[in-house]
Image (spheres, rainbow, N blue to C red):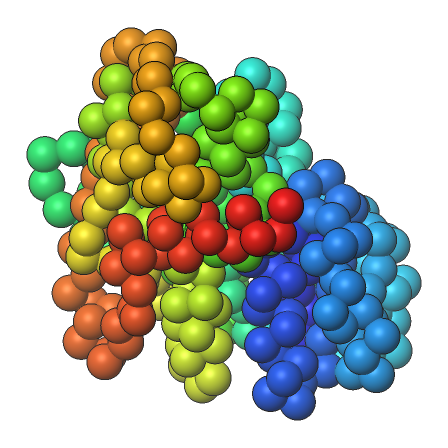
Amino acid sequence: MKVLITGGAGFIGSHLTKKLLNMGYKVIGFDNFSLGTKENLADFIYNKNYSFYEVDVTDIPKMLAILKDINIDIVYHLAANSDIQNGGQNPQIDYKDTFLTTYCILELMRLKTIKKLFFSSTSAIYGNITDKLLSEELGGLFPISYYGGAKLAAESFISSYTHMNDLSTIIFRFPNVIGPNLTHGVVYDFYNKLKNNPNKLEILGDGTQCKPYIHVYDLVDGIIKFTDNIKTGLLIYNIGVTTETTVKKIADIMCEEMNLSNVKYEYTGGNIGWKGDVPKFQYDLTKISKTGWKPKYSSDEAIRDAAKRIIKEK
């Protein structure tokens, strides 16, 4: 199997690459290093079954040139602006890095007659729905962030390309993903803030924001399981855990793992961290659970493991 991973130097992409290489796949990675890092490639950059290209995924001619004599079995499209808070400052970021990258990958697949696609979507496409479980069949979706809007638009284009080109497509709607090699997010931010000042921690919002967090190892196992034998057409799954963790609890866990006591929490106020943030959500996981898939880590366990690893890495 020859696979292409966009966002291959990123947090999730590097973990997926490592797992697929260990399984004997030949992997090609694309990344422009806007969020990905060369350090994430260190474990496998010299693997004989791995090839990496520094390329912007919106550059169709360059991608076609790279893949001119290569037949790709499946594309794992992970390239996107995953730093939602930063993207909220400029809509062009998510237009280009989240939506346009997807359109260009779909065009690449059409021109190269690549028939299998995995796409990383997000809970952000559901918008600010806090009073019900979010199921894949839920309609009337109104995202409140540029990121969520770009991902929902990308899903729509994927649906049309899948139908028009007889693709076999899997979409996973991710919750918050954490684990080794984090580059941003609440766990990463809390560690850096406490490293700079172990006596005080600024917490965006009021600390009651509550969401499910999935460990990247569980996520990667799920991705591989569901892309092993994709049927023609489009399948969409929420993937996640049945538990959730508040922001205050994340702060408590980080303080515990850093052996800090009597840290003063200072809240910025309000029930969201930034404009476009959803204060809480919970998935309906019935559809994916019926397949037999389930995570090994609970939300709190994933947070604690991520905290331990970031402390060790730094």
From the viewer's perspective, is residue 193 above or below residue 140?
above
Residue 61 vs residue 189, the one in the foreground = 189
Give percent across and percent down for residue 67. Answer: 83, 69
Q: Quadrant of residue 14?
A: bottom right
Report the number of numbered marks.
0
Image-based side of 122 in relation to 278, left or right = right
From the viewer's perspective, is residue 162 above or below residue 174?
below
Image-based side of 272 in relation to 176, left or right = left
From the viewer's perspective, is residue 309 above or below residue 91?
below
Q: Quadrant of residue 271?
A: top left
Q: In this view of the protein, can residue 209 be seen by the observer?
A: yes
Q: Residue furthest top?
A: 269
Give percent across and percent down for residue 87. Answer: 56, 26
Residue 81 vs residue 189, the one in the foreground = 189
Residue at point 48% right, 25% down? 198
Give percent across and percent down for residue 178. Answer: 45, 51
Q: In this view of the protein, can residue 273 be seen by the observer?
A: no
Image-based side of 251 in relation to 165, left or right = left
Residue at point 18% right, 57% down? 242
Residue at point 10% right, 40% down? 132
Give percent across and percent down for residue 150. Answer: 49, 36
Residue at point 21% right, 26% down? 208
Residue 181 vs residue 166, the one in the foreground = 181
The image quadrant where one finds the N terminus is bottom right
Residue 290 vs residue 39, the one in the foreground = 39
